[in-house]
Structures are given as C-alpha cells and as structure tokens.
Image (cartoon, helix red, strand yellow):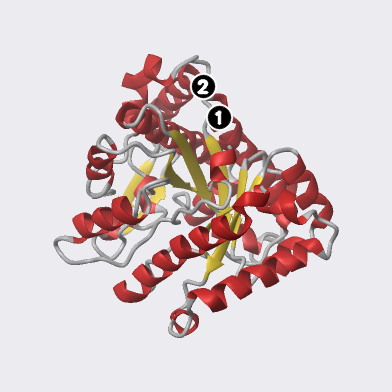
Amino acid sequence: MSELTLNYTGIGSLPFKDENAPKKALDFIFTEFKSMPFWPQLPHFAREEDMVFQYTQNLAGLSFDGDKYFLNSECDEFFIALEELFFDYESVTSASDLFECEEILNKYAILPPNSNTLKPFLDKLKNQNPDFVKGSVTGPFTFSTSITDNEGKCAYYNDILRDVCVKTLSLKALWQVKEFKKAAPKARAVIFMDEPSISQVGSCAFLSVESSDVIEILKIIANDLKKFDVISGIHCCGKTDWEIALSSGVNVVNFDAYFFAQSVANFAAAAKKFIENGGFFAFGIVPTVDSELKTLDIKTLEEKFNDSIKFFISKGIDKNLLLEHLFLTPSCGCGSLNCDDALKALRLTKELSICLKERYGVYL
C-alpha cells in the first residue's frame, strides 16, 4: 500500500445537476484524479442517488408507501428474498474469486436511476491505468438506522433486518470490486463505508447502542472486502468515539482533519497501534464548508496540515511513520457546495498532495 502515501482522492458526492452532470463529474475526476479516481454520487441530479436510497435495489423486504420506503418483514415475499440473500452471501464470501460468482453478484448491481455515473465511470476506467480505484457504500450502522421496518422502528434494532442490511451492503461493495477489476485489472480496489451516524453512538439518539455491536457489523464488511484483497475504509466527518473506527478492522480511517484532528489524536494508543499494524489515515484536510473555502489557499492549507500533524506528534506518534501512513481527501463529500467551491476543494486536495510529496517524499 506504499503507493497510497501522500496520495489523494475524493469522498463521493458532487453538486453537478444539469443534464450533462455525469459527464462533467467524470471528465473532471479522470483529469484531476488519475492515480485514484473515485466513483461520484450526484444527489442533486437524481434524488435516487441519496446516500441511503442508492443502495436499496434488491434489498429484501423493501416496500413503498408513496415516497416513504421501509422494510416489510411480515410478507411471504420477504422470507423468500431472505433465503435467497443468505444463500447468495454464503456463495460469494466462500468463493476464491469474485468472477466465480459473477451471476450472483450481478443481482446486487447499482443501476440507474440509483446511479447515473457508475456505468460511464467503468467505461472511462477501461481507458486508464490507475494505481487504485475508489468506490463506496453507506456504512451498515448509518444504513440500518436510516431505514425503518413497517412499524417505523430502525432496522438496526431488529437482528434479522440488521443482518439483511449488512449482507446486502457487503454484496453491493463486492459487486463494485468485481466491476472495477473487470474494467481495470491492475488497479487495486478501495471501498469506503460512509458512516456519519457513528458520531451519534452514545448520544441520546442511540443510548441503547453498544459500541462493540457497531464494531462487529463494520468488521463483517471489512473482512469480506479484505478477503478479496480490497482496501477497506471508513469515513466519518464528525467527532466520534474513534475507538469504533480504529477497531473496526478497516485498512483506512478517513476523518475531518481540518476540524477534528485533535479529536482523533486523543485516541493516541489506538491510533499508534492502527498505523503500526499497517493502517492508513485518510486526512480529510480540505474543508467542505463554503465559509472556510472562500479564502483558503494552498499556503494556508499546508500550514493547517502541519498543525494537524503536530497533534499526533504531541501524543508520541512518530512523524515519519504517520506521514508514511496517510493520504489526502476533502473533509467530506462536496455535494453541499456550489460547483465552483466543490472543484476548488478537489483541486486543493490534489495541490496539497503534490506539495507534500515534494517536501517529504525524499525522507519517506
């Protein structure tokens, strides 16, 4: 994973919304993010690209009441779909190669209208030769606490429905990996679990949630991915109990290093163990807040990066070890920004990566 050192990529969402949005997004990504292109989400272009709904195709028990969607576990169709899901999951995760079970995985494809960029992303990928290619799924905790059962209770609190969410997300992640390998056989797949809701674990919203249970479902997906040589990651842009992310079995922990570097550094023992065992931090050092971006330039950003690094050094973490085990991203997706600010955030991420490689590359 040494090619990741001081490299850069994006998180996912972009604000493009006109009829040419998919082309604009992909043209930019494949021009500016050649080493690690990322599959973008366009929630303003199609509402089906909402970060939760995007992964609901072929979700067992999915039902609709007008615009509202939920999991209905009280119908015969649910138990038929449940049996099929469990068989599919066992078949895929016990395979030695994802192409052995391509027909099964294709049932968990992410297709239009839930993604309008993935197919053209794969088409463009065939003409590139990147070191890495990045995809994503909604993290299992965020997903299962955002979808309810037919009584309006979070799926997370139902053991069967939680399992449905976890297994479906894992299969959708592995389907992406299979498609990435088909399009770019030499590129190593990177899959992030986007987990904003873990920042609420322990709060009044989730008082009954045990951290160990959250870690367990994250580990399931992380281990499924790592079995097929995938770099697994978790993204949380808020302040949280970082023991959850650092203990989840992922290869990469992505956090908002612009605002919360000290928060992560405070978990020094876990952070040190994480990188000593080969883990990487993805520093979300470029803010995705328009008020911060307006006056931000590369010099100020480099100073902010250095300040963030100092928090870790002050906790006894070796500077060179940390630099060897980090790469850069924006702090979160750019979907909430206007197009100009979003592109500025992405360009600053790339520019900082170039600056840091020039400054530290000779020492690493």
Using the numbered discs, state the Cα–Cα distance from disc 2 to disc 1 in whole angstroms: 7 Å
On screen, 232 above or below 81?
below
Left or right of residue 117, residue 220 in this image: right
Q: Position of residue 64 (x, y in %)?
A: 31, 51
Q: Residue at x 79, y 49 (%)?
A: 272
The residue sitting at the left extreme is: 19
165 or 334: which is nearer to us? 334
Q: Quadrant of residue 346?
A: bottom left
Upstream in sequence: badge 2 or badge 1: 2
- Does the residue at mark 2 contact the one at mark 1 (Cβ under 8 Å)? yes
Q: Position of residue 10 (x, y in %)?
A: 44, 56
- Other residues around mark 2 within 10 Å, as few (<14) / some (14–19) / many (≥20): some
Residue at label 2? 93
The residue sitting at the front extreme is: 362
37 or 92: which is nearer to us? 37
Residue at label 1? 224
Q: Is residue 210 visible?
A: no
Determine the secondary structure under disc 2.
Answer: helix
Q: Position of residue 3 (x, y in %)?
A: 54, 41
Q: Residue at x 41, y 45 (%)?
A: 35
Q: State which quarter of the image contains the N terminus.
A: top right
